[in-house]
Amino acid sequence: MARASKRRRVSEGHSTTYLLNNPKSKLATRPLDALFREEVWELLSPDRREACLALLPAIDKNEEQESGLCEGFWMGNVCLQEALRDFQSDLAEGRFMPQYRRRVERASKQRLEGKADAWKEGQFELFCQHSEEERRF
């Protein structure tokens, strides 16, 4: 019985939900450049490639290439590297977890309702007073 639960833990650690939401997932803690390279792209089915291509901006696509990607896409693509770093940072910070999303949605709703304005105004006054005191010295 213990063996079955151990298997379940391992499979949960590799589930898509866990990998894409948990700050402790391997996607948050390991270098992603090993996953985002041409050799891995070639392993994807044509349907999966099409789904990925649909997410890319036109500048990264080239229908004349067999891969569907522009020449040099995998080599020194600064935008891709930056996006991967941002994704990994957000994942490590827990920004994809359901509770974080709920907090963000609540805060957005409160801002739309004007509930944050009074707080901001109070903080603005404190900031201005603090800044004036610093300038005197």
Image: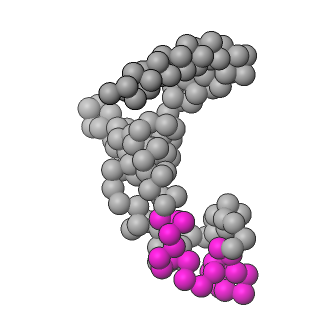
Q: Main secondary structure of the magenta part?
A: loop
Which of 109 and 34 lies nearest the eye of the viewer? 109
Q: Is residue 116 left or right of residue 41?
A: right
At x 53%, y 16%, the residue is 125
In the image, the segment drawn in magenta is: 60-81
Q: In the rendered image, which quarter is residue 49 located in?
A: bottom right
Q: Residue at x 37, y 25 (%)?
A: 136
Q: Position of residue 58 (x, y in %)?
A: 72, 71
Instruction: Indicate yes or no whether the magenta region holds residue 64.
Output: yes
* Magenta-drawn stretch contains 109: no
* Quadrant position of the C terminus in the picture: top left
**Residue at x 39% of width, y 42% of height:** 92
Q: Quadrant of residue 6?
A: top left
Left or right of 1? Residue 59 is right
**Type of colouring:** one colour
The x, y position of residue 123, in whole percent, is 52, 18
Residue 55 visible to an observer of this rendering: yes
Q: Position of residue 45 (x, y in %)?
A: 61, 70
Residue 106 visible somewhere in the drawing: no
Residue 61's place in the image compared with 25, above or below, is below
- Residue 62, given in percent of the width and then of the height, sits at 70, 81
Name the image quarter holding residue 64: bottom right
Task: Please say if 132 is above or below 7.
Answer: above
Q: Quadrant of the N terminus?
A: top left
> Against 43, is 108 above or below?
above
Q: Relative to residue 24, is residue 105 depicted above or below?
A: above
Q: Residue at x 73, y 81 (%)?
A: 63
Could you say which is closer to the camera, residue 13 or residue 132?
132
